[in-house]
């Protein structure tokens, strides 16, 4: 009789980034902390916000653009290619039937040949944030945390973005 038991463990996820978004009060302003960095988001006045920061969609476009620029600079640097500047132009467009898309144009400045430019544009489609957005990375509930007083953790490491 075979007494060998085979168990298959579910893949384990390892957190590689974290952020906390906090909205308090009657307006739409949101304070964001990611690690020790502080950001903000808001809605424009015509949408009922105070226009004190970029919109959440603006932050999404910023994430796609910055990841694209960083990844291309890293790749060109490893290859020793003469990439001087990467400029990523992004737009969020709404279409019929509540569809939406992100448009992206990449300007590569430097003395690059056609093969190098084509390779960099190919790499742009595989950057981590581009893949997360275009692949529809699932957003899953992480489970409830005990309620805390409104000011709890305001000056502690508890809310440093690395939960």
Image (cartoon, rainbow, N blue to C red):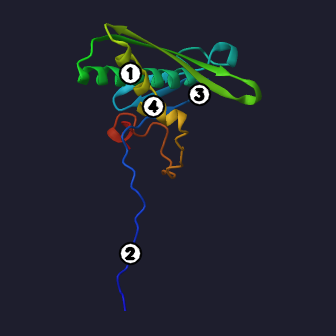
First in residue order: circle 2 vs circle 3: 2
Name the residue tied to disc 2: 6
Tell which residue pokes out farthest to the right in this image: 97
First in residue order: circle 3 vs circle 1: 3
**Camera-nearest label, 3 or 4:** 4
**Quarter of the figure that contains the N terminus:** bottom left
The residue shown at (59%, 27%) is 25
Q: Disc 1 to disc 4, how far (Cα)? A: 16 Å
**Camera-nearest label, 2 or 1:** 1
Q: Disc 2 to disc 3, how far (Cα)? A: 53 Å
Residue 17 image-quadrant placement: top left
Task: Tell me if residue 155 comes above or below residue 122 in the rendering.
Answer: below
Q: Residues within 10 Å of mark 2 (few under 14, many from 20)?
A: few
Q: 51 or 90, which is in the foreground?
A: 90
Name the residue tied to disc 4: 129
Residue 129 image-quadrant placement: top left
First in residue order: circle 2 vs circle 4: 2
First in residue order: circle 2 vs circle 1: 2
SS category of the residue bearing label 2: loop
Q: How many circles with numbers are drawn on the protein?
A: 4
**Which numbered tag is attached to residue 120?**
1
Residue 46 image offset from top left, x and y in percent: 69, 14
Q: Disc 2 to disc 1, how far (Cα)? A: 44 Å
Name the residue tied to disc 3: 25
Residue 159 image offset from top left, x and y in percent: 39, 38
Q: 34 or 117, which is in the foreground?
A: 117
**Camera-nearest label, 3 or 1:** 1
Do residues under tags 2 and 1 come within 8 Å of each other at their CB atoms?
no
């Amino acid at each position: 009789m075979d007494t060998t038991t085979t168990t298959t463990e579910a893949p384990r996820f390892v957190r590689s980034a974290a952020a906390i978004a906090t909205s308090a009060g009657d307006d739409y302003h949101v304070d964001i902390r990611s690690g020790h960095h502080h950001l903000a988001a808001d809605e424009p006045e015509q949408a009922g916000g105070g226009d004190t920061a970029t919109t959440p969609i603006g932050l999404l476009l910023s994430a796609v653009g910055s990841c694209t620029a960083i990844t291309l600079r890293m790749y060109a640097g490893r290859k020793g290619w003469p990439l001087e500047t990467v400029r990523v132009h992004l737009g969020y467009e709404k279409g019929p039937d509540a569809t939406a898309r992100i448009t992206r144009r990449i300007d590569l400045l430097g003395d690059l040949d056609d093969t190098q430019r084509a390779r960099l544009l190919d790499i742009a489609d595989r950057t981590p944030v581009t893949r997360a957005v275009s692949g529809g990375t699932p957003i899953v509930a992480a489970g409830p945390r005990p309620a805390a007083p409104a000011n709890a953790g305001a000056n502690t490491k508890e809310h440093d973005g690395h939960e």
